[in-house]
Amino acid sequence: MIQSIDRAARVLSSLQGARHLGITELATLLALPPSTVHGIVKSLQSHGLVAKEPNGNRYMLGPALLKLSNVYLDTLDVRARAMRWTRELSRRTGLSTRLGAELFDEVIIIHHNLRPDGSEQMPETGLSIPAHASAMGKVLLTYNPDAADDVLTRPLRSLTGETVTDPARLILQFALVAERGIATEEDEAVLGESSVAAPVVDRSGSVIAAVAVVMPSSEWPPDDNVLNDLRETARNISRELGATVWPPPVSRRHALDD
Amino acid sequence: MIQSIDRAARVLSSLQGARHLGITELATLLALPPSTVHGIVKSLQSHGLVAKEPNGNRYMLGPALLKLSNVYLDTLDVRARAMRWTRELSRRTGLSTRLGAELFDEVIIIHHNLRPDGSEQMPETGLSIPAHASAMGKVLLTYNPDAADDVLTRPLRSLTGETVTDPARLILQFALVAERGIATEEDEAVLGESSVAAPVVDRSGSVIAAVAVVMPSSEWPPDDNVLNDLRETARNISRELGATVWPPPVSRRHALDD
DNA sequence: GAATTGTATTCGACAATGTCGAATATGGTA
DNA sequence: TACCATATTCGACATTGTCGAATACAATTC
């Protein structure tokens, strides 16, 4: 791990708060001398990864990130393949759908289809949700025991009263997911919102993403048509990626076995 | 400039091509030894800024970029303020509108309103366009002579037969922009698409963004209502940001004066 | 299935490079 | 105007990143 790159990445992370930060603030946050931070920030700035506030001397994330992120999305194979299927899924179920990928202990939404009823809705692409509080996250963790270990060793943050924060309970849920190929979440990330998710598998048989259907908790539980449509969608995307089996087998040992 | 951070940023840039790259390819591209590149890439990977292809050993941009970029957009003051005005501008003119910021020799679209006619359109947020081929770019360069110098010293790439690639002609256009507070572009970036742009000014009087109206070239030139609506929009956003004068005066000397 | 090639990856010595503290500049506030 | 807080510059030092060689790995060919 290269020290200065690691520090640079930490600077970017620190800049994710709503508030913009000055050199001194960053320095105390990272426990580094201001001159060191200054050098890092200027290097990032010269590539547009960080920008100085128009007036004032605070720093914020830079526009180059938007460009890179756009390329990221455009060249993501899963996403390109999944889009037409999730659109169809949204249409059939009348619900909003998401495609998500793992980002450490979170799931990041890499594609979002609005509910087709034309109501006012926020685009959710780019949002990230703690893995343990999301149906997609539960899917991804179930099929990636390494990631699961990582998440379960740290304390689990509660987002709503319903968030499952007990590792043991989560592990039980993983077992269910492995069995049914489907994960659920009821009000665990956002009150009034629940979701069901299924794994997306690639040629090599690894789970590389998850598809989800999101519904108002008032309509919970989803009826069997929705579950079947979701399953079909996940299977279709996976097939298009070259997967041969669906749902996939769970790779091996789980956190409990240690 | 910190060497390793500079190199890391270059790695990210190189990964912007549609094709994913292996360590060796990156190494030859950057003229560095493979082991060096490997260290950099692994450091970036450990922060999710770069990701290994699911199977295979090529690298691509990572999901952390999407998260950072999302924060970038959400915390951009201009964007938040401009959105409601550009939506209104789209509605009044029946055209698609853009908000753009400078990114070195390009303009990056930080907000996009679709044409309200409900036709099939691509969201453009995140796209970047060479500054010299875009109306927004001409606005930004006109009011940032430093950036203009930078762009004009390098050869200008032609995107369509109509792209202005002669620095002298561009400088003439900048003078016109400075006079009228409005820049135009006819088929210069995309054939069949033309646009008009105006500057967005902040409290300190600097031009920090540009608003544009995009129309099919068949409807060119825009009538006076469109121009007035655009000007009003730019003025309103600027006012909301604390600007006192609009259009702003051009700061000082221009490339020609050297 | 064995061999070969083109990869990625690990390792350790060297010195180039980033780091840090002190000195200086800047800008805002009393 | 003087003061304070913050950003920024500078240079000596030793930590740290760099590089080439050695190794491991994987795919492809015969």
Image (cartoon, coloured by chain):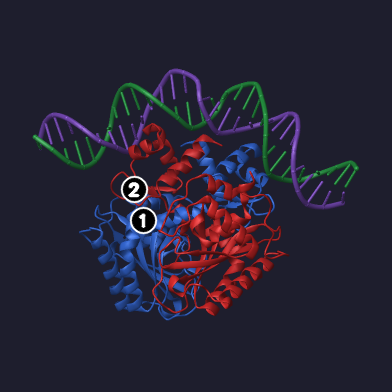
Chain colours: A blue, B red, C purple, D green
Which chain letter goes with mark 1? A
x%, y% of residue B195?
A: 50, 67
* Front residue (pair B193, B102): B193
Q: Which residue is mark 1?
A: A75
Which chain letter goes with mark 2? B
SS under mark 2: loop
x%, y% of residue A58?
A: 66, 50
Q: How many marks?
A: 2
The quadrant where residue A168 appears: bottom left
* Front residue (pair A180, D4): D4
How many other residues sit within 10 Å of disc 2, few (<14), some (14-19) or many (≥20)? some
Residue B20's label in the rendered image is 2
| Residue A17 appears anywhere in the view | no
x%, y% of residue B257?
A: 64, 46
x%, y% of residue B112?
A: 50, 67
Q: Residue at x 56, y 75 (%)?
A: B226
Circle 1: residue type: Thr
**Looking at the image, is B233 positioned above or below residue D27?**
below
